[in-house]
Structure formats: structure tokens, C-alpha cells
């Protein structure tokens, strides 16, 4: 029988380095980054970033592909993003409040709404999850389950292809602990498809170049009409 303790220790060792942890957290935005971008983001030399990326790739946390001279990396999948978000949520709130206008602004934007790999988090993600639960679209008493009404709402009101939900190699719905709200938001294939459709419908727009998103005027009207979410909950 394999030594699971040794395997867990090896995984923990990958994240026990501040630079590798910073790289992984940057990749939680779901996008592909170049090695150079990650080097600048973490404040290390490109050669150092490359060494860390090689270790993360060999450990199964990231995957890479090359396009021309560029090396692009992203998280190996939603399970890795879920693991990272759960670990950050376990840490609790930051020991010290954000200092400086820019830092405080970024923190406020992330708390209001952000992507958690491929689904929505922050107040926005929790508000949508609460509204779906209140309307009987989602059962959240013991884990998460999508009701028949919820499946119909996704297909008819949001235009989510039911085949895409069933074809995904992941749970259709799963609770994901939100590290800013300290409550759960909707993850899984349904959460990913909902985020995708809201983006396609121009209900969402990115804030800057990070993970933060905000609801547009179209989105406020759409969420009010489909889920009864008041606009002031989204700001």
C-alpha cells in the first residue's frame, strides 16, 4: 500500500515555499500566465520562477503549454483551485488590515466579487448561492444538490447547456468555502457554467487585471429579474 503520509508531505512541501504559494494563488484566477508574468508578480528572477514552475508541474499542481517563445502555465484543474481556496479560508482573515489606498481598493474589490478559478466568489458568489437556495433551485442543508427547478432555471433562464453540466468530469454542484465571507458559495460544473454565461451576457466585467469582477447594469437587472437579488447587495 502506498505511503499516503509521504505523498501528503510531498504535496505540502510544494506549497511550503512562499514563491510557489504565491504563484499558485495568482493562478487561481483561472487564466494562463507566462513564466515572466509570474516572475514579476512574485518578485523573483525569471530563472527562479522557472525552477519553481518545474517543481509545481512535476508535482501535478500546474500544467503548461508553449506557444511560440512563450511558456504558459495554469492550475492543473478546479480541484487544485478548490484546495488552495480551502487552505486560504482556513487561515482566517489577515492578521493586519490592508494599508495604502491601492491595497485597500484591491482588497475591497476582491471581497465584493471575484473569480475562484472558474466560478464566482465574494459577496457576489454568496448572494447568488443564497438566492438560489431561497428559491428552491439549490439544496444546501447537507452538502449541495441541484434541484429539478434549479436545472431548469440554468437551462431556460441562463442558457446553460445541460450536456455541458453532465459532461464535466467534476461534481455538478459543490460548496466552496469563501475566504472573505466565511460562508460557502457555489462551485462545481454549475458554478463554472453560471460564471461563463454571466460573462457572455455582459453581466460581469473584470476590474483591472486580477481576479476581481463587478456586476454591470445589465447584470444588476438580470440578477434582479431571475433571482430577485437587490442591486445594493452587489456593490
Image: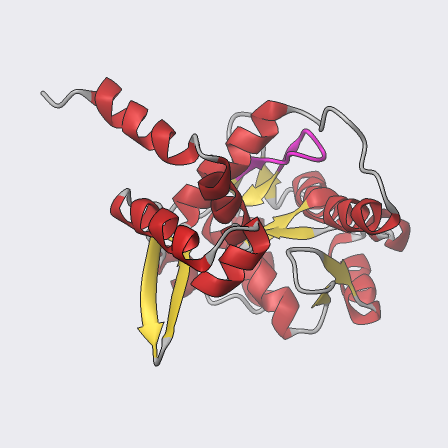
Q: Is residue 200 above or below residue 25?
A: below
Using residue 112 as the reference point, say whether residue 158 is left or right of it. left
Q: Which sits in the foreground, 157 or 32? A: 32
Q: Name the residue rendered at 34%, 50% in the picture.
A: 51
The reply to whether residue 151 is in sight is: no
The residue depicted at 43 percent of the width and 48 percent of the height is 78
Q: Identify the residue at horizontal 67%, vertical 73% (top origin).
A: 201
Q: Is residue 189 left or right of residue 170?
A: right
Q: How many marks?
A: 0
Q: Is residue 7 left or right of residue 226?
A: left
Q: Residue 215 in the image: x percent, y percent?
A: 77, 61
Could you say where residue 199 lies in the image, as x and y percent from the top left?
64, 68
Q: Position of residue 25 (x, y in %)?
A: 53, 45
Specify how the rendered protein is coloured.
secondary structure
| Figure quadrant of the N terminus | top left
Along the horizontal axis of the image, is 83 left or right of 149?
left
Segment colored magenta: 175-184
Amino acid at each position: 500500500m502506498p505511503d499516503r503520509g509521504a505523498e501528503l508531505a510531498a504535496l505540502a512541501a510544494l506549497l511550503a515555499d512562499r514563491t510557489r504559494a504565491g504563484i499558485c494563488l495568482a493562478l487561481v484566477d483561472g487564466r494562463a500566465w507566462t513564466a515572466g508574468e509570474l516572475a514579476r508578480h512574485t518578485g523573483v528572477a525569471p530563472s527562479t520562477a522557472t525552477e519553481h514552475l518545474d517543481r509545481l508541474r512535476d508535482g501535478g499542481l500546474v500544467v503548461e503549454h508553449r506557444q511560440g517563445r512563450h511558456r504558459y502555465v495554469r492550475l492543473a484543474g478546479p480541484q487544485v483551485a478548490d484546495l488552495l481556496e480551502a487552505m486560504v479560508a482556513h487561515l482566517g482573515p489577515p492578521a493586519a488590515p490592508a494599508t495604502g489606498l491601492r491595497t485597500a481598493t484591491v482588497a475591497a474589490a476582491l471581497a465584493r466579487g471575484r473569480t475562484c478559478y472558474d466560478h464566482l466568489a465574494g459577496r457576489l458568489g454568496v448572494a447568488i448561492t443564497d438566492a438560489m437556495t431561497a428559491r428552491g433551485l439549490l439544496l444546501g442543508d447537507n452538502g449541495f444538490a441541484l434541484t429539478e427547478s434549479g436545472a431548469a432555471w440554468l437551462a431556460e433562464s441562463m442558457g446553460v447547456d445541460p450536456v455541458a453540466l453532465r459532461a464535466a468530469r467534476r461534481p455538478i454542484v459543490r460548496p466552496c468555502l469563501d475566504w472573505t465571507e466565511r460562508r460557502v458559495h457555489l462551485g462545481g460544473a454549475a458554478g463554472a457554467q453560471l460564471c461563463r454565461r454571466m460573462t457572455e451576457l455582459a453581466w460581469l466585467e473584470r476590474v483591472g487585471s486580477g481576479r476581481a469582477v463587478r456586476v454591470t447594469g445589465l447584470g444588476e437587472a438580470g440578477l434582479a429579474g431571475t433571482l430577485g437579488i437587490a442591486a445594493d447587495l452587489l456593490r
